[in-house]
Image (spheres, rainbow, N blue to C red):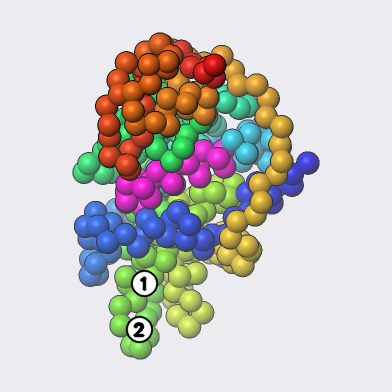
């Protein structure tokens, strides 16, 4: 049986997905870390701290993850897919964190079957909602489902799931995230004159760390402000002085614990092999989901006269996109 570390201990400093997010050269990714904006005022920080409890999973969620009431393998696979699509479209870092925030908050309030299409549908809905909240351009729902998903869903199915997610989240989509605190904590750090642009370096490195903490369930034990503070200290390095007023509005011991956890996972290997798990049969599919793994017509850009019902188009698309067909139900293997 796989250990907990097998399922939740990837390297926090791995550049496989999150590094692409922060290092992207697009205006959407670099504009917000160029220069040194003024820090948030104390009233804004106090307001964010007050709102934090409304934008995190329910209190027993971490316990349920640790006792495996939540399928950690399905959670990890979902987050991996979210980050791959996120990097594919060069979305901003906040979009990645929001997607997983919605995902965990939903699972803390509503149980899903252990395997199959429900987790994939939830992943698509959460990423779509986060992109709509943060991105100036959001791909249509069919195009959003890239990076070899096991299932592809009709837009109407995803939209219904989006409504369900929003209802479970009590329509609180403007979540408080660690990114809301990065300016504040970065301005608290005392930099040496030898660093040419410490703000951009710390901001970028902290962003990479924050995104990768979403893979590790142990970080669910810390509030967004604690994660942000620990990430800034980690990114600043040992030679940077952390003044005592850095901890004025947060728990110093919690920051130290979170920082220690970041160090422990950052020295680990980047990708651990996934445990070999026999998957149970997927639950019955909803209307509007296509089994991408079973349907050969999904992997071709030419018309296939023998494809299943609902596949009436042979339209050619750019290589970066995959041709997807609508189907009233799951499309089974072709003879």
Q: Residues within 10 Å of mark 1 (few under 14, many from 20)?
A: some
Residue 251 or residue 23, whichever sits in front: 23
Q: Give the label on residue 195, or none.
A: 2
Tell me the element at label 2: loop
Bounds of the magenta segment:
75-95
Do callouts 1 and 2 mark residues in contact (Cβ within 8 Å)?
yes
Would you name the residue on which mark 1 appears? 201
Q: For the point 51% across and 45% down, which residue is it? A: 80
**Does the stretch in magenta take in 91?**
yes
Tell me the element at label 1: helix
Instruction: Write down the quadrant of residue 178 in the picture.
Output: bottom left
Figure check: 153 above or below 172: above
Q: For the point 40% across and 43% down, which residue is it? A: 85
Relative image position of residue 27 (x, y in whole percent):
21, 57
Q: Give the label on residue 265, or none.
A: none
Residue 63 or residue 5, whichever sits in front: 5
Answer yes or no: is residue 59 visible: no
Residue 219 or residue 78, whichever sits in front: 78
| Farthest residue, direction bottom | 194
Number of numbered discs present? 2
Relative image position of residue 309 (x, y in whole percent):
40, 11
**Does the stretch in magenta take in 38?**
no
* Quadrant in the picture for the C terminus: top right
Q: Is residue 255 left or right of residue 154?
A: right
């Amino acid at each position: 049986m796989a250990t907990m570390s097998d399922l939740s201990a990837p390297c926090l400093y791995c550049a496989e997905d999150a590094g692409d997010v922060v290092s992207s050269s697009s205006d959407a990714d670099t504009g917000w870390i160029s220069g040194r904006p003024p820090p948030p005022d104390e009233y804004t920080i106090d307001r964010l701290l007050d709102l934090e409890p409304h934008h995190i999973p329910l209190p027993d969620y971490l316990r349920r993850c640790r006792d495996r009431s939540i399928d950690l393998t399905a959670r990890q696979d979902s987050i991996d897919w979210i980050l791959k699509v996120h990097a594919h479209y060069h979305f901003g870092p906040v979009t990645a964190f929001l997607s997983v925030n919605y995902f965990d908050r939903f699972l803390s309030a509503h149980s899903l079957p252990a395997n199959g299409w429900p987790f994939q549908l939830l992943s698509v809905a959460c990423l779509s909602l986060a992109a709509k909240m943060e991105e100036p351009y959001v791909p249509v729902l069919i195009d959003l489902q890239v990076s070899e998903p096991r299932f592809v869903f009709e837009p109407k199915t995803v939209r219904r799931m989006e409504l369900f997610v929003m209802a479970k989240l009590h329509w609180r989509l403007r979540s408080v995230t660690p990114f809301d605190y990065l300016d504040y904590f970065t301005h608290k750090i005392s930099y040496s004159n030898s660093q040419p642009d410490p703000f951009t370096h710390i901001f970028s490195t902290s962003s990479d760390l924050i995104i990768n903490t979403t893979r590790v369930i142990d970080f669910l034990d810390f509030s967004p402000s604690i994660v942000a503070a620990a990430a800034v200290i980690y990114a600043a390095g040992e030679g940077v002085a952390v003044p005592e007023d850095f901890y004025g509005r947060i728990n110093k011991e919690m920051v130290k614990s979170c920082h220690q956890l970041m160090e422990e996972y950052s020295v680990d290997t980047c990708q651990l092999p996934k445990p070999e798990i026999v998957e149970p049969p997927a639950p019955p599919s909803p209307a509007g989901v296509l089994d991408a793994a079973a349907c050969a017509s999904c992997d071709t850009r030419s018309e296939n006269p023998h494809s299943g019902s609902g596949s009436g188009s042979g339209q050619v698309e750019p290589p970066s996109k995959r041709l997807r067909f609508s189907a009233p139900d799951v499309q089974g293997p072709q003879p």
